[in-house]
Amino acid sequence: MESLEGSSSNSAFKTFNGVDVMGERLADEVSEVVKNNPGVSKVSFVGHSLGGLTLRYAIGKLYDPPGGRSVRQEKSESSTTNSEKGRIKGITQSHATIAGLEPINFITLATPHLGCRGNQYLPFLFGFAALETIAPLVSHWFIGNTGKHLFLSDGDKDKKPLLQRMVTDCDEGKFLSALKSFKKRSAYANVCGDRMVGWRTASIRKAAEMPDPLHEGLDSKYSHVVREEDVPVVAKGSSENQNSKPEEISACDAAEEEMVAGLQQVPWWRVDVSFSKAKATYQAHNLIQVKTASAHGEGADVIEHIIDKHFSEYLVRDT
């Protein structure tokens, strides 16, 4: 069974430092956990909100190609025991790994995969065009470099914004290859009631791909899970799902198209969640992860869904 660890490297105001800085911190933390737990062989990640983007950056830094070694592993090799070196070498020779471990599940909950710049990506702005235009200009005043990354305002003529780079393999990290290495990638998204992260950016959909919102649970056991679907791989440059002519696509839409196309180069399992009938409907952003049991316990069935659909086979096998 995977070792379940909660990250502590990006708390409080550290979340203002930017996705890249937080991702580096998390990668260091994961490396340390792996080093201190030599018996662990598999790894899964669950990231909520901004944490999902931080995870995507971190795994790009921790990715080890088949038969290869990550920069991070090479730097720490001098402090690694001979037995641990042998364990890591044996794994990396056969398949890709994350920090020397077999990648199993990559799960995000209400994560703004496409950033916050699109229409209704940041629901507390109520979709008002004026507010959505102003937000990218002032976000860094409140949340520092993280604001620049979320609103894709960190790029320049020679370098695309970080979130656009993170749908590729580049000098900064093997972000796409790292995602591809996991057996399963899942994106849980709130259909409504999430004031922080919009449904479209959390579910990695283009505007033309948005389905009708559903609010009836698929299963009585998971009363808030309203849709499950496999997202097929779309080859890069494919004409499929291209619904607009190039001259009709705005700069914002072009960035969105590129990010969706990049992320859809690997298969995803998309899960839509609706708390429309919950007592605390407009706390959906915290309900989906049960931030506190007393205030957000209505979302417990979503956590059960995650465990049953991603970890049950390992729990049964290892008991």
Image (tube, rainbow, N blue to C red):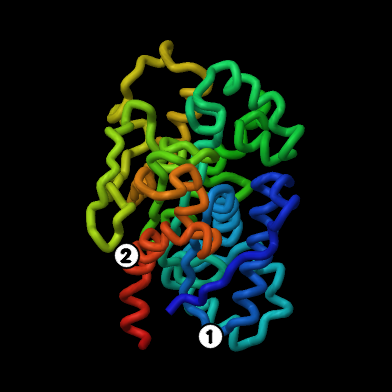
Q: Position of residue 238 (x, y in %)?
A: 32, 31
Residue on which the image places disc 2: 309
Is residue 108 in view from this perspective? no
Q: Nearer the viewer, residue 183 or 207?
A: 207
Instruction: Name the residue at 49% across, 68% down.
Output: 67
Q: Are marks 1 and 2 in contact (CB under 8 Å)?
A: no
Q: Amino acid at mark 2?
A: Lys
1 or 2: tag closer to the N-terminus: 1
Residue 127 lies left or right of residue 172; in this view the side is: left
Comparing labels 1 and 2, the label whose residue is closer to the camera = 2
Q: Position of residue 43 (x, y in %)?
A: 48, 70
Vertical side of 150 occupied by 221: above or below: below
Task: Give the crowd class for mark 2: few <14, some 14-19, many >=20 residues within 10 Å.
Answer: few
Q: Position of residue 279 (x, y in %)?
A: 42, 49
Q: Quadrant of residue 186?
A: bottom left
Residue sitting farthest toward the top: 247
Instruction: Name the residue at 50% across, 72% down.
Output: 101
Cα distance in 3D space between marks 1 and 2: 25 Å
Q: Amino acid at mark 1?
A: Gly
Residue on which the image places disc 1: 39
Vertical side of 1 occupied by 144: above or below: above
Residue 34 lies left or right of residue 243; in this view the side is: right
